[in-house]
Image (cartoon, grey):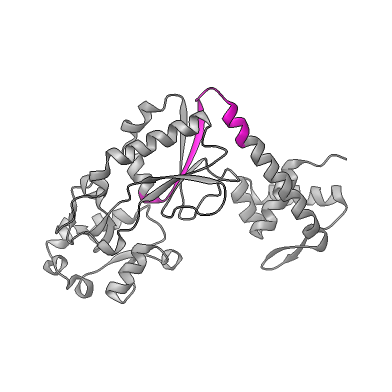
Amino acid sequence: MTLSWDDLRIFQAIAETGSLSAAGRRLGMSQPTVGRRLQALEQDLGARLFDRHPDGYLLSQKGASLLPLVEEMAQAGEAVERSRLQLEESIAGPVRLSTDPWNCRFISRRLDELMPSLPGIELELVMAYSFANLSRREADLAIRNQRPVEGRLAARSLPDADYAVFGARQYVERQPDAFTDARYGSCRWIGYDDTLDHLPSARWLAQKTGRPPHLRYNGAGHFIDGVLGGAGLAILPCFLAAEEPGLVRVSPIVTEMRGDDQWLVVHQDMRDAPRVRLVADKVAALFQRNRSVLQPVLGAA
């Protein structure tokens, strides 16, 4: 009997996520398919790998003994794949870049500047608030707000965006307090829901206002639409001012959120892969050329 590596990957994903649905999302499969493949693997092994509970799947004793072996196989397979890309001479092919939604917007609005320098590259932009696991090739490159200190990762600095308080023109014209520190008590605010209250902008806003935002989003996808729609004030990256004439900056740059540079991160096994290196170089150059947009002159609005 020869076991399928694909089925073992499914077993590993269920063990790490605790559910069929979460494993399916990670692997790009439907929940029924994941369930069928797990059942087939258990039949091939003649062993129950998980105990089913109302709140998820927990490893059985036999599943727990199998998991370290599968993890070793996965690590070896990932290392082989990373090495394969380094041996390729052609730069054509996909490169996956993981970053937060604001950086994704910054890059996306400048693709006419970026893409001509990437002939043959199929660029995949992945929006995520969590860090992609580069060892498992969840991405080839990632932009992070912290320099990695663990793992075999290499990083180069990128200029980070400055932030300030913005509102729609139609809103701030009706709210003169928006231009003073009274804004924190008298104006409506737009922010994130509880799932994102760990973000620096969410923590800063909570400290300044002492109350929840009047309008909350679970991501940045339509966040800017709420501001442009006149729902209230929000803290936003300053580069948006150059893209949205309907926005008005009503505060100085928020220096409390000005930290160290952000970091473009790659696994050391991938840094010399031709197409990954090319994308890394061109993305870094894009950020450097636009430093004055990302970090406008400090001062009043």
User: In x, y percent, where is residue 122?
Assistant: 47, 31
Question: Residue 68 vs residue 270: left or right?
Answer: right
> Is 62 contained in the magenta span?
no
Against 222, is 234 above or below? below
Magenta segment: 82-102
Q: Position of residue 158 (x, y in %)?
A: 36, 45
* Percent coordinates x, y for residue 29 in the rendering: 63, 45
Whether 180 is drawn above or below 224: the answer is below
Q: Residue at x 31, y 77 (%)?
A: 210
Asked if 244 appears above or below 285 in the picture, the reply is below
| In the rendered image, the vertical position of residue 51 relative to residue 47, given as above or below | below
- Which of the 4 image quarters holds residue 267? top right
Q: Residue at x 81, y 63 (%)?
A: 61
Total label count?
A: 0
Query: Residue sitting at 69 percent across and 68 percent down?
Result: 54
Please check the rendered image and state whether residue 84 is part of the magenta-colored stretch, yes or no: yes
Q: Quadrant of residue 62?
A: bottom right
- Which quadrant of the rendered structure holds the N terminus? top right
Depth check: give the residue in front, 200 or 56.
200
Q: Is 163 displayed left or right of 37 in the figure?
A: left
Tell me if residue 149 can be seen. Answer: yes
Q: Is residue 252 left or right of residue 219?
A: left
Residue farthest along the top direction in this orientation: 90
Inspect this view and state whether residue 49 appears: no
Query: Quick one: quadrant of the C terminus?
Result: bottom left
Q: Residue at x 25, y 62 (%)?
A: 255
Of residue 178 and residue 95, the one placed in the foreground of this image is: 95
Q: Position of residue 232 (x, y in %)?
A: 24, 64
